[in-house]
């Protein structure tokens, strides 16, 4: 709470408890994944904790959080304050209707299970969470190399910054001189009695339409010029700050750490191209991998080199490391993103609603991560997870992820290309 919401007061204790419970049980799911790989606890005990964990997280995401979001929204509306409990229930029922209808266009329904079974709930939560994951992953896969690689940095020199600062100072001087002219004109009009002797009310409006003093026309024109110059000064200031930031990035890219991140940028760019290519292949040929990528990669390497290698032993340890990296980066990346989002839109009245929305997004994101991480695990480690999650269409979620990832990545490429192309033209504009 101190780290995420230090600049805003989240006074409602129930909001703090709901966020903490959601975060704790989300992290517990990842902990259970690690337990599956390492073989910690008995299989029956792990199954029991999986079942309890999923029941609690689904109860929070489907029933508790949506109800309290509606409750705090209604509480901020004065007209509905006396009947906020009734309207909160109506909002929750509306949410449940659309949440349940979400399963109609997707092949996730299972008539074998009850209405409030884990399979029915987690299938719908998975659609929302996988969509969110794919959108963030697509943008991140493109934005990460664009941010890290020095290749995409504009060539900014001290001359460019001085020229832009000179334009900014000239604009500020023009604004000051024009405001002085406006003050002088007002003073002249005041001395001539054009201010105090003006009629008031209806006759003032009639006279202003039929006649106008020369000084007032000049004031209107000068004020329009000042407004335009102030807007120009704001744009020049932002461009100057952008040039300074770009220059700092250029200097940073020359350091050892900057070169390291530049290398990572090239690595992630290759990964991004490969991921887009594989997502396209999966969509076209309706393909879903049967073997986890770690075991498959080790088998290809062993067969190519022709060496004796314990594939099962090393796939367990490498899978543990890979899944651990995925878990840590997912939690860290999502918390950083949610914190920035909270700082951007939160206020004293909306802070409770925003925190609950973040808890909802976080919970759905992590539940969906379990659905997708399952494919990165060897078959013997995903048995309990598959048993707990039930008869879900796992292949559908992977295909859906590929579709949304491809759309998000291509849209991000187009957006960053247009932004990168327009940036030099903006600075070259006289």
Image: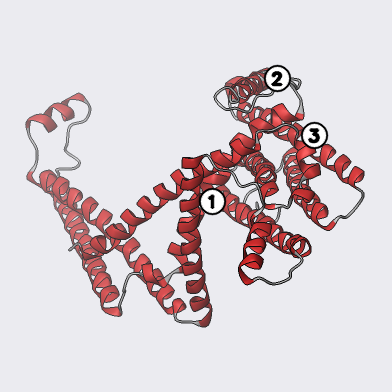
Cα separation, mark 3 vs mark 2, equals 20 Å
Residue 376 placement (x, y as % from top left): 67, 52
Whether residue 154 sits left or right of residue 100 in the image: it is left
- Image quarter where the C terminus lies is bottom left
Specify the label residue 120 is tagged with.
none
**Does any portion of residue 328 appear in the rendered image?**
no
Residue 55 marker? 3
Q: Nearer the viewer, residue 160 or 73?
A: 160
Q: Are marks 2 and 1 in contact (CB under 8 Å)?
A: no
Mark 1 in CB contact with mark 3 (< 8 angstroms)? no
Q: Position of residue 85 (x, y in %)?
A: 70, 21
Residue name at image x 64 percent, y 65 percent: 303
Quarter holding residue 81: top right
Q: Please tell me whether mark 3 or mark 2 is closer to you in this view.
A: 2
Pointer 2 residue? 111
**Residue at image location 14% in from the left, 44% down from the top:** 193
Pinpoint residue 140: horizontal percent, then vertical percent: 51, 55
Q: Nearer the viewer, residue 289 or 77?
A: 289
- Among the two numbered marks 3 and 2 on one chain, the one whose residue lies closer to the N terminus: 3
Give the residue displayed 66% in from the left and 63% down from the top. 298
């Amino acid at each position: 709470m101190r780290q995420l919401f230090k600049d805003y007061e989240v006074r409602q204790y129930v909001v703090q408890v709901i966020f903490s419970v959601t975060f704790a049980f989300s992290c517990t799911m990842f902990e259970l994944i690690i337990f599956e790989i390492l073989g910690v606890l008995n299989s029956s005990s792990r199954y029991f904790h999986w079942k309890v964990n999923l029941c609690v997280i689904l109860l929070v995401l489907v029933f508790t959080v949506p109800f309290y979001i509606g409750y705090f929204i209604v509480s901020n509306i004065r007209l509905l304050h006396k009947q906020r409990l009734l309207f909160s229930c109506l909002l929750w029922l509306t949410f449940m209707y659309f949440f349940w209808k979400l399963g109609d266009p997707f092949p996730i329904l299972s008539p074998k299970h009850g209405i409030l079974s884990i399979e029915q709930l987690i299938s719908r939560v998975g659609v929302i969470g996988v969509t969110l994951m794919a959108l963030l992953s697509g943008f991140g896969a493109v934005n990460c190399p664009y941010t890290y690689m020095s290749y995409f940095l504009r060539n900014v020199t001290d001359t460019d910054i001085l020229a832009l600062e000179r334009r900014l100072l000239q604009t500020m001087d023009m604004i000051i001189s024009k405001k002085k002219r406006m003050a002088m004109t007002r003073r002249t009009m005041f001395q001539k009695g054009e201010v105090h002797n003006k009629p008031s009310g209806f006759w003032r409006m009639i006279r202003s339409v039929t006649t106008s003093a020369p000084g007032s026309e000049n004031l209107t024109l000068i004020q329009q010029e000042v407004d335009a110059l102030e807007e120009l000064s704001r744009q020049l200031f932002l461009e100057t700050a952008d040039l300074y930031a770009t220059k700092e990035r250029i200097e940073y890219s020359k350091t050892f750490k900057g070169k390291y991140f530049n290398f990572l940028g090239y690595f992630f760019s290759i990964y991004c191209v490969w991921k887009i290519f594989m997502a396209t292949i999966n969509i076209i040929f309706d393909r879903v991998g049967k073997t986890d990528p770690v075991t498959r990669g080790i088998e290809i390497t062993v067969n190519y080199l022709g060496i004796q290698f314990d594939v099962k032993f090393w796939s367990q340890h490498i899978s543990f490391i890979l899944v651990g990296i995925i878990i840590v980066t997912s939690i860290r990346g999502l918390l950083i993103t949610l914190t920035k989002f909270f700082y951007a839109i939160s206020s004293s009245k909306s802070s409770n609603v925003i925190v609950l929305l973040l808890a909802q997004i976080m919970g759905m994101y992590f539940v969906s991560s379990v659905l997708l991480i399952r494919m990165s695990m060897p078959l013997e480690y995903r048995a309990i997870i598959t048993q707990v999650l039930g008869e879900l269409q796992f292949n559908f979620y992977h295909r859906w992820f590929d579709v949304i990832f491809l759309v998000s990545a291509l849209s991000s490429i187009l957006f960053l290309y247009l932004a990168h192309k327009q940036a030099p033209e903006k600075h070259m504009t006289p």
